[in-house]
Amino acid sequence: VREAAVDPNVLAIKQTLYRAGPNSPIVEALMRARDADKQVAVLVELKARFDERNNIIWAKRHESHGIHVVYGFPDIKTHAKLCLVIRQEPDGIQMYVHTATGNYNPETAKVYTDLGIFTADPEIVADSSEIFNYLTGYSNQKEFRRLLVAPIQLRARLTELIAREAEHARAGREARIVVKVNAITDDQMIRVLYRAAQAGVSIDLVIRGICALRPGVPGVSDNIRVRSIVGRFLEHSRIFWFRNDGHDEMFIGSADLMERNLDRRVETLTPVRDEDVLAHLRDVVL
């Protein structure tokens, strides 16, 4: 973001801020970008619990610099972590996206484990651009190319991906799911996972906080194992991996398996399409 702020070829920066913290270098860089006459649009979520004061202060400073500040929706928190940079290149306009599991917050970044993807993948940047249009009221998008987006289609797509593993298991093919999130409390998703386990899918859940799913119940969740990791750093990354009969699919993002994340927040899950990165996350992190 600092580099984009001073790059003369950058035309615009768009950013979501959920918990920016009291001394955010990102916020300072965004204001420098606006001072350099770049278009800057920021979604500031005022309802981030315990950070309301900081976010109101940052929002006012943004507006005083001429930044287009959007406050999101009255009844839905914007929890997605997205930064979009639009740059003039020799062969035309190019967009770059950073999408993450963690907040753009310098304090939590020191003590939380999180993941981010920086990409120019055309489908992911197109989806990200449309999410910003959705957040600013210029779009009523219902379909996305690659991203899974709540509250629009994230629940339905996760249900489909879990059900697909169940079909693989019933057909005798490779079927495995590993999910790493902060919490799982949504009763519908729990039932979907139970049904997949009963179909023969091997399921591992790494749940840092609350887990309302009961593993190891005979005839219900024999194939599900749950663990929580409490270590030096707070485990905050969300990863969803589906074996898909050897054609791995993986997503990282901001959403936990909770009703609020699936139905009452703007969340994104981004596919990990680079094979080396996917292998690292699967074999080392998970």
Image (tube, rainbow, N blue to C red):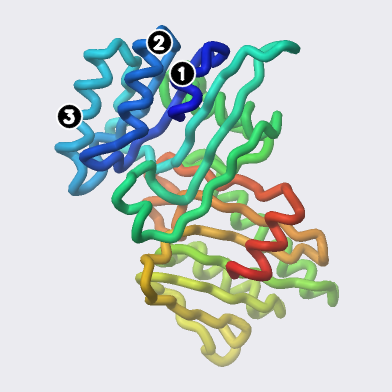
Pointer 2 local density, CA inside 10 Å: few below 14, some 14–19, many at least 20 = some
The answer to which image quadrant residue 223 occupies is bottom right
Quarter occupied by residue 43 = top left
| Marks 3 & 2, CB-CB < 8 Å contact | no
Q: Amino acid under label 3?
A: Ile
Using the numbered discs, state the Cα–Cα distance from disc 2 to disc 1 in whole angstroms.
7 Å
Please give the residue where the numbered disc 1 appears in the rendered image: 6
Residue 234 to residue 129: above or below: below
Q: Residue at x 43, y 66 (%)?
A: 184
Residue 1 % position (x, y): 46, 29
Which residue lies under the disc numbered 2? 36
Alpha carbons under labels 3 and 1: distance apart: 24 Å
Which mark is first along the chain, 1 or 2? 1
Identified by mark 2, the residue type is Ala
Residue 37 in percent (x, y) is at 41, 7
The extreme top residue here reads: 37
Q: Earlier in the sequence, mark 3 or mark 1?
A: 1
Mark 3 falls on what kind of element? helix
| Mark 3 or 2: the one toward you | 2
Instruction: Give the residue number, with chain letter if any, for mark 3.
Output: 57
| Residue at left offset 30%, top offset 39% | 20
Residue 18 vs 277, above or below: the answer is above
Report helix, strand or loop for mark 2: loop
- Front one among 59 and 195: 59
Residue 132: percent from the left, percent from the top? 48, 25
What is the CA distance from the residue labelled 3 to the residue labelled 2? 22 Å
Number of labelled discs? 3
Contact (CB < 8 A) between labels 2 and 1? yes
Query: Which residue is depicted at the point 62% across and 73% down?
Result: 195
Kind of residue at disc 1: Val
Q: Earlier in the sequence, mark 3 or mark 2?
A: 2
Helix, strand, or loop for circle 1?
Answer: helix
